[in-house]
Image (cartoon, helix red, strand yellow):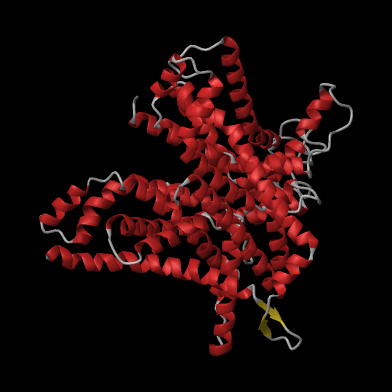
Amino acid sequence: MEIKKGFNVTFYLLIIPVLIWLITLIVIPHGELFISSFLVEDDLGEMVFSLGNYIEFFSHQIYWMTFVKTAIYAIGVTVLAFIVTFPIAFYLTKVASRKNASFLMLLLLVPLWVGELVTVYGWMVLLGDHGIINHFLIGVGIIDEPINMLYTNFSMVIGLLYMSMLFMVLPVMSALESMDDSLIEAACDLGASKWVIFTRIVIPYAMPGIVSGAIIVFMLVIGDYLAPNLLGGKNSLWFTEQIYNEFLSTFNWNEGAAFGFLLLILSSSIIWVALKLSGQKLEKVGS
Amino acid sequence: MIRSLPNSPLYKVGYRVYVFLFFTFLVMPLLAISVLAFNDSDFISLPWHGFTLDWFFAATDEREGLFADEGLISSIYVSISTGLSVAAMATIVGTMAALLFEEEQFRFKGLLYFLALTPLVIPGVILGISILLTATAAGVHIEDNFGVDIELFRPSYWLVILGQFAFEATFVMLLVSARLKKFDRTLEEAALSLKATRLQAILYVTLPFLRPAIIGAFVVAFILSFSNINTTIFLVGSDPTLPIDLYSRIRFSSTPVLNAVSFMIVLTISVFALINFFVSRKKTPS
């Protein structure tokens, strides 16, 4: 019984800070976001309930086109991140020697820790009209005029891919690590081709890791601001930029709240569909 | 295709080339800015005009190096102090959350755990605007009713700390939970049967076991805070953090001093990563 007595004090000691964190910084702010998105200023300067902010969104092509474009590009970058990094995750867990793998892992983590701003800036320096890549290509005589790479959809996708792809590698690696090599050996002994081994054994085995990675990558890309803003051109408007404009340029916070809420719905519904399709739980994604 | 199986030479070479290209792609932007930080030119890119340390130390009218630029030094200071505060708060509350969800049973546990995970799927921009809206509404409310203006509720240093803390506590919680799952619960039971209170058992048995994860989580939280921009940009007041300062410089006035700052960040992180690499290799000789 004495155990029971101590239990209560500790329980309240633990739960109170956690409740304060979740209620004041997660629940109330998102409730406020939701409510603000339905408020507009009437002629008298009073805030009144209205669907105006959402009507505004659907009646201006530029808003919903950007929204759709952001969603499509985010899905595209997620798929690309999987294609680009899957061979690397496989290499690091199953092909490379332990020593090499741990060194390469280190290389993999440095860009992640350095932070997005520095890496995006690095890509600006590389891809610019007078940037290093153009300089190099002209230097060796492959081209005469600089290729316009910066401020295009191409540079934006490079930036988005670069900052998000490592979040695909890590969960896929941890899924592959638990895979028994003899599964692959057995398939190989039975005469399966490499393609069959990858598509029928390795990828299905790594699926939980792939889904976790895909959700994180998609989330990061859809909510990203730096890569579209600094690497994308005038035509590469990203939905977060619209939110940013409403808040920090035109100061129409209620319109911005509606945009934010729409983005939240878009990201959570796509994640929900991904979880349903793969039969996973959100708890799994975190671990 | 794996270590134990033979491969055709073509496949082997092809695979190696791909891995090489991938890591080149990864290192290129970091290498580029690091080298250009030493370029004796007034523009951020090539051509190479010779080696100089001007972008670190110069203090003339034409060139102002990193260490002479008071704006930059002050934003670095703001970032470090923000990072330490956020990391400390996130580590404490995140660890409490991990203990709560791993060890306690209570009503609505599932709902609360779900809430604690939501920062993983809420874009940083949305967290930023939500907290900005709420703080502003609260500030206006308090000013109207009590006539006091509280700085915390306006975009400021403190609001940045709260905003970053809101999502980083989740990361700490997950890192600490992962270690807590490996904890042998009988150790705690032994302490309890030796008449320790539950709080004593946590303080003297569980927390020492969690120490490596807690330190790791603190470092992760600091790094996340130091590089955060999506949430911070909406909450920042008159004293910008380093990424906010760099961002406005990149947009409005690029000089090679940006390369120098980036180089310092890359250098710090690399040294740190190498130390971590050798320390952890010593611990696990395999």
Q: Residue A165, position in %: x, y?
A: 59, 39
Left or right, residue B41 beside residue A38: right
Q: Residue B72, position in %: x, y?
A: 64, 53
The foreground one among B228 and B13 is B13
Q: Residue A24, position in %: x, y?
A: 47, 71
Residue most extreme to the right: A144
The foreground one among A205 and A19 is A205
Image position of B285 with respect to B124: above or below: above
Q: Residue B266, position in %: x, y?
A: 58, 39
Image position of A232 with respect to B25: above or below: below
Asked which quadrant contains residue B12, the reply is: top right
Q: Residue at point 72% right, 44% down? A: A156
The foreground one among A143 and B174 is B174
Image position of B17 with respect to B200: above or below: above
Residue A52 visible somewhere in the drawing = yes
Left or right, residue A44 beside residue B159: right
Image position of A213 with respect to B284: above or below: below
Q: Residue at point 73% right, 63% down? A: A245
Residue B56 visible somewhere in the drawing = no
